[in-house]
Amino acid sequence: MDETAAAADAAPASITRPLPASLNDPLLDTPCLLIDLDILAANVSRMAALARRSRVHLRPHAKTHKSVRVARMQLEAGATGICVATVGEAEVMRAAGIEDILIAYNIVGEAKLARLLPLCADGGITLTADSLDVAEGYSRMAAAAGRTLPVLLEIDSGMHRTGIAPQLAGKLGTKIAALAGVELIGILTHAGHAHDVTAQPDIEAVARHEAAAMGRARDELDSNGIPVQVVSAGSTITAPYLSADDGITEIRPGTYVFNDLRTLEMYACTPDQIAATILATVVSVWPDRVVLDAGNKTLTMTSTQQHGFGKIKNRPDSSFVRLSEEHGVATLGTGDCVLRVGDRVQVLPIHICVCVDLQQQAYGVTQGQIAELITIDAARRSR
């Protein structure tokens, strides 16, 4: 067998097959990720407009979509750069020509620092640290890269994951700023605990505390003679409540591009702004349940009290009662139309960021027709 034939045999069927025409096309296999291109475009435009009104820079978090195609949409709409969570994601985006990248994660260990070195040597990478130990690794890398590396000090604004208390920013910031090859340019936070509240006023209160924590940290750095150029905050949930009036200079929302049932619960989107769904096929029907070919390897095990593991689109009383690896067991509402084996349904996911990471590609859909194949370029790049 020659090399061309061998390569054809090794290629995934999804690449060699023609693009399906519609959601009913028998060539379209399930489960698969669908992205409504019209909703996506509207979501991208809406957040860009919010950033302009709030007089802050927009640096979207690419961990939601992991797609060069979508990242470029965001940049074309006015984003000043992108944010990623891993060195792997940064490698993919840089290889695609995206130059301004913030890695919002402590990069620890020689293996990761060795991979990060060529990216930093080329410039355009901003790093994050919440300890002197992490920053010292960056200092060693800066010497090898032959350039000064910009770093943001991570502040804990209430999530209690990573980040230091705002009142400690001056003390730690002074030590980091003294390291060779490191330029401390500002502060960063993530108020992910906004997901822990349920009422809209409580979400706003989380954002107010987020802004206050960043203000305190900035004052601590200023009082120690460290100028703060960047104050980075604001998720999809809290960004609408932040502005330049709070001293915020950039926001880093991610989920907004697609949205999901979690952002819907948090008043951060409306039902018609959910752009991504999972297309699944009914594989078994019983009087008390239907079984879909989308299980926890597609939908993930993320759940909420209100929506469980997800909902079937246009069937608000549906409920996923159990997920196995490849099986999704759901009940339907009493008024729902009967489903039969072979029927296809769209599932509204709970946490779209994880769902996307489990896919290698998505189908871009407009008006019910498949328009393009979108590669999830950084899928499974979790390190």
Image (spheres, rainbow, N blue to C red):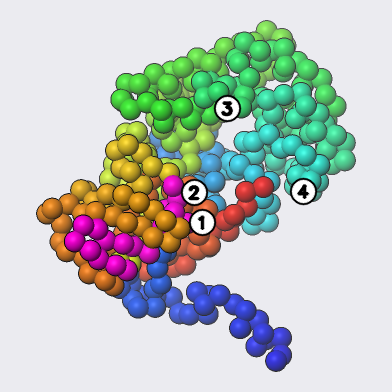
Q: Is residue 99 magenta?
A: no
Residue range highlighted in magenta: 283-301
Tell me which label, 3 or 1, sits earlier in the chain: 3
Query: Element at badge 1?
Result: loop
According to the image, label 3 marks what residue? 161
| Three-letter amino acid code at the position of disc 3 | Arg
Residue drawn at the location 41% of the way across and 31% of the way down:
195
User: Which is nearer the N-term, disc 3 or disc 2?
Assistant: 3
Q: Amino acid at mark 4?
A: Arg
Q: Position of residue 89 (x, y in %)?
A: 63, 49
Category of crowding for the residue at label 1, using alpha-carbon neighbours closer than 10 angstroms: few (below 14), some (14–19), many (at least 20): some
The earlier-in-sequence mark between 4 and 3 is 4
**Residue 283 locus on image (x, y percent):** 32, 68
Disc 1 designates what residue?
358
Q: Give the residue pinned by disc 4.
A: 115
Q: At x 68% / y 34%, what residue is drawn?
A: 106
Q: Mark 3 and mark 1: span between their CA atoms?
A: 24 Å
Q: Position of residue 291 (x, y in %)?
A: 31, 62
Do the residues under discs 2 and 1 have CB atoms within 8 angstroms?
Answer: yes
Q: CA distance from mark 4 to mark 3?
A: 25 Å
Whole-percent x and y of residue 318? 24, 51
Numbered disc 4: secondary structure: helix
Question: What residue sits right under mark 2 in the picture?
Answer: 354
